Amino acid sequence: MLTAATHQQQFGDRETVPAWTGVVRHLHITPRAFLPMESFDELTLVPGKGIEGDRYMIGRESGFYSHKPEEGRQITLFEIETLEALARDAKIQMLPEEHRRNVTVQGVPLNHLVGRQLWVGETLLEATRLSTPCRHIEEILGKAVFDPLINRSGLNCRILKGGVIRVGDAVRGA
Amino acid sequence: MPKAIKHLQAVVREIDEPRPGVKRLVLADQDGWRLPAFRPGAHIDLHLANGLVRTYSLCNDPADCRRYVVAVKREEAGRGGSRHIHDELHAGEVIGVSVPRSGLEFSPAGMNIFVAGGIGVTPFVSAILALEREGKTNYELHWASMGHPSLIDMLEPAVKGGRVHLYNTLEVSPPDIKSLLGPLGEDAKAFCCGPTGMLDAFESAVAEWSESRKHVERFTAPKLVPTLNAQPYSVVLAKSGREMEVRPEVGLLATLDAMDADISVSCAGGICGACRTRWTEGPPIHHDRVLSAEERAHEVIVCVAECAGARLVLDL
């Protein structure tokens, strides 16, 4: 007979133990709007502020249409699975630096994390809202990615605990 | 209120004058960051301090994304852009630069014939640098210039390889375009940039060619495509009473931006709702994908909307 205790032992407590563990595949920032994102092996996250050197660091915003600072957009995440789906379903090759989010993850269900907290390496993030695609990216890339990215354009987060994140870091729910 | 960022900021790293009357500018990011990539023959808009916006071809190798190089001939009788660059712009200044656009599609196997007059060579300089870097020699440049050609130093390997044909029009006639293009095969492509007379002669010479085989370079920005039969209308900001005409090729969002309207914009594609605004006179033509029919009766997503009436009054 499956008791509550054995159920928890076998399947875990859904409230405290997430059923997924992901990994950081790529890290990108750019210091100003319109400039290409550049790849880094590690980035430094400053709690309540943003990523050192990135355009959306609170206090130095210079992103496209970002003249109104947004505290919940200190760091952005994107699923590598979306890039694979774009190639497979829409025949659009989109590179990790082209989606213009900071952290490309694998195995992380970003759309289900709004309002939740997650660990990325040693740092702790709070997911604030889903990202929306923007026409600006289409203009920059010359690729018709706006519609294919609706509802899968990444996740905006606030940085609760800062530190260094690295390619290969584990991503897990908090 | 700070305005939305519409172009990147570049510092003028160097200015030189390869021949009198032609200034060559090297633009770069202030921290040496990579600039947006560009295709051979692409051009950019320079947003000059006097409010003028002027388009110039990039003439460095597209593989070199740490800088943009443009060459500007002083046009005494022009509209002021080149005079400003020649007289007012100095190294160290920061100016706005658009993302590069357009570019040239070469014939991969056939000959590519570039026909240039004077400073009209600029789009072909980046094209030739790209072809040379790839080891491709299936091209010729026919370049007419009054006196010493201005950017010849950028084409040294091509000149040594015999692929550049110069016509100093102080001494010889400009090229006979028809006879240049006559013997080419069906897989050849031809490109032209220069003064009006040269463009007319080129277009006459290639009149029978298919559109895909010929390219005339004119420095005009690509037009936005408005809704079929769209009419101009006025947008009114109710709180300030300001009013401006919205021309279809400009659109509502760019007009509101020009008016310094206090709106947030994010997706610019009618899905995020950041720019939803109440309207009191219209009616708007809704192109968004977020508002319900009930909401549309009094709200509008301005980043994608148009107007069916003569005036669109917004609660701004």
Image (cartoon, grey):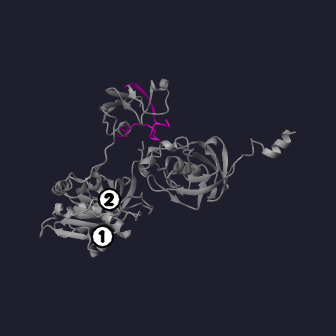
Vertical comparison of B87 with B310: above or below: below
* B65 with respect to B145 (left or right): right
Q: Position of residue B79 (x, y in %)?
A: 21, 51
The quadrant in which residue B21 appears is bottom left
Residue B312 - label: none
Q: Which residue is mark 1?
A: B154
Q: How far from the left and from the top, in percent, is residue B277?
A: 45, 31
Kind of residue at badge 2: Gly
Q: Kindly tell me whether residue A130 is visible in this rendering.
A: yes
Q: Amino acid at mark 1?
A: Met
**Residue identifier under label 2:** B41
**Do pointers 2 and 1 mark residues of a single chain?**
yes
In what element is the residue under mark 1? helix
Seen from the viewer's position, the closer of residues B208 and A24 is B208
Q: Is residue B34 above or below residue A20?
A: below
- Determine whether, in the image, residue A46 is placed left or right of residue B208: right
Please state the horizontal and vertical placement of residue A139, each as a whole percent of the image: 41, 48
Are there few (<14), some (14-19), or many (20+) residues within 10 Å of tag 2?
A: many
In magenta, the rendered stretch is B256-282
The chain letter under disc 2 is B
